[in-house]
Amino acid sequence: MPKRQSINWPAFAHSNPIPNASKIGNLVMSSVIGPRDPTTGKIPDTLEAQVKNLFLQLAAAKEAAGGAPDDFLKIEFFATDQAAGRTALNGEWEKMFPDPASRPARHTQPLPANAPALIQCAFTAVVG
């Protein structure tokens, strides 16, 4: 059986001793990914800016894991306002996954209103 490997990428780290993602064989599952700006490390005020940062982090994650956008199997989003979150996601979603016949599963769940971010995500991917 393949050995588990921690996956991390520059400009993103958890405050707890956990990796950004974990990989066994060709299966990759992430920890929660927040919308911090990869350059400044700060969370922007607007939902739209946070969504753009999430997709920058997803791009960095797939590279770190040795994958491509087609390798994402499911992405779960967590939003303080689920309806607004879904709407804000659609533009970046269609950019990263332009083919409607080949998109990962997606689910949006509630994030507590007092969370420091308006939106976060976690993913499952099969690389290689």
Image (cartoon, rainbow, N blue to C red):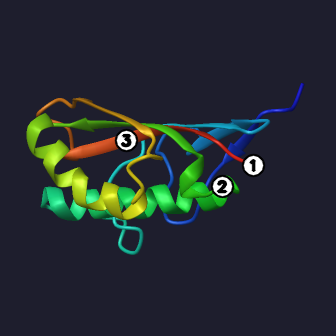
Q: Residue furthest bottom?
A: 39
Which image quadrant for residue 28? top right
Whole-number angstrom distance, CA of label 2 to CA of label 1: 7 Å
- Residue wearing tag 3: 121
Q: Say which mark, if any, is on residue 67.
A: 2
* Mark nearer the N terminus (2 vs 1): 2
- Left or right: where does residue 108 sit relative to residue 60? left
Residue 44 visible in the shown view: no
Which image quadrant for residue 35? bottom left
Point 56% across, 52% down: residue: 70
Amino acid type at mark 3:
Cys
- Residue wearing tag 1: 128
Point 70% across, 43% down: residue: 6
Q: Say which mark, if any, is on residue 3.
A: none
Amino acid type at mark 2:
Gly
- Left or right: where does residue 88 sit relative to residue 17? left
Secondary structure type for disc 3: strand
* Mark nearer the N terminus (3 vs 1): 3
- Left or right: where does residue 115 sit relative to residue 25? left
